[in-house]
Image: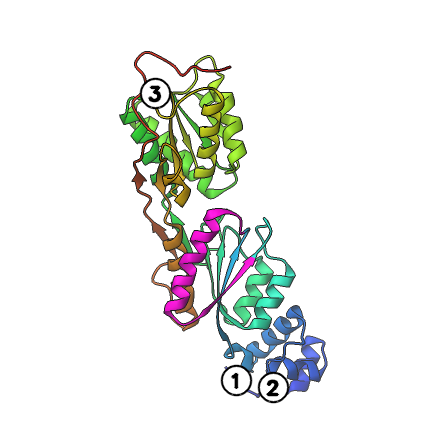
Amino acid sequence: MKPAHSIAITRIAELAGVSTATVSKVFNGRSDVAAETRAAVEKIMLSHGYQPRTRFATAPLLELILHELNGPYAMEVIRGAERAADTHRMALVVSDLGGKHVPDGKWIENTLYRRSRCVVAVLCGPSEHQLAQLTGRAIPVVMVDPLTEPDPVIPTVHAANRDGGLAATRHLLELGHRRIAVITGPSDVLSGRARLDGYVAAHDAAGVPLDPALVREGDYQVEEGRRHALDLLGLPEPPTAVFACNDAQALGVYQAAYDRGLRVPDDLSVVGFDDLPLAKWVTPGLTTVRQPLSDMAAEAALMAIRMAHGESPAQHRIVLPTPLVHRGSTAPPRRGTAPTGRP
């Protein structure tokens, strides 16, 4: 590589199609340059061995991006990321995408302007172009629980979703349930497919045939859990148990059982997935699979911080265990009976 300053600023400006003043601003870390222009100039600088100072002038900031901040899920994630940032005396910057799963141009511009040291993206991720901009500034990105298969160059932290679905369903089978419904997550989301795979695998291992009528696709929202559960409980042969693939949908199942005049777990057993704080406060307490959200965020943050310090990740994919937490929402089915109640 050629030494720094081996190519004149005038030549960089010519190659980038910008003024020499703009190149000078980029080199000196000025903020009044559009993000795309800055990225283009820096790419040319780096290809000619001309190291912009901004590549090293990062601030002790950890960027945490969430697709939305509503609910206890986000709070658990923030708690974990903050724990890791505090350990390294870094400040945490939290961005809410308002339900979107890809940051907009405003977010990337603000991140580059702040000269943040690293990024953790939860249930979302930068576009290919945004990733190139971050890479050009030596800002590493780690993803937590990505919705789809991420670019293999991006390190990821996951929960053992399939194992959790397997444990939840096996627990109900061991109690004696044979008509076990499942309310999944969206079919285009990795976690939803993996938890459903665990449900199917548990039935296969037990030699219990699956009834397709008991499989419903949800959206991880309370109302969707309630809607599907009401429909399931209205079947000629209703389920005696429901595995809801997140705690929010499990709460919807509780509401549906109440609406039908049924009692949990006497008439209907329910298992969730997440073990959010609310799971222990509902009545009865929710048996659920613990997804270690806080630990996942902390692990991802620590990985991103180490990468920002020049370390290579020991592994690109970290999977944390998902144990089953037993509470009061599951019991053996009533012998020879199916759930009944108000129509």
Q: Magenta residues? A: 69-95
Most common SS among magenta residues: helix
* Proximity of marks 3 and 2: CB atoms separated by less than 8 Å: no
Asked if residue 173 is positioned above or below residue 32 in the image, the reply reads above
Residue 205 on the magenta span: no
Residue marked by disc 3: 178
* Proximity of marks 2 and 1: CB atoms separated by less than 8 Å: yes
Q: Coloured how?
A: rainbow
Few, some or many C-alpha atoms within 10 Å of disc 2 (few <14, some 14-19, many ≥20)? some
Question: What label does residue 195 carry, if any?
Answer: none
Residue 89, position in %: x, y? Answer: 41, 72
Mark 1 secondary-structure assignment: loop
Residue 267, position in %: x, y? Answer: 37, 20
Question: What label does residue 2 carry, if any?
Answer: 1
Distance, label 3 to label 2, CA atoms, is: 73 Å
State the residue at coordinates (31%, 39%). 324
Residue 165 location, quadrant: top left
Distance, label 2 to label 1, CA atoms, is: 9 Å
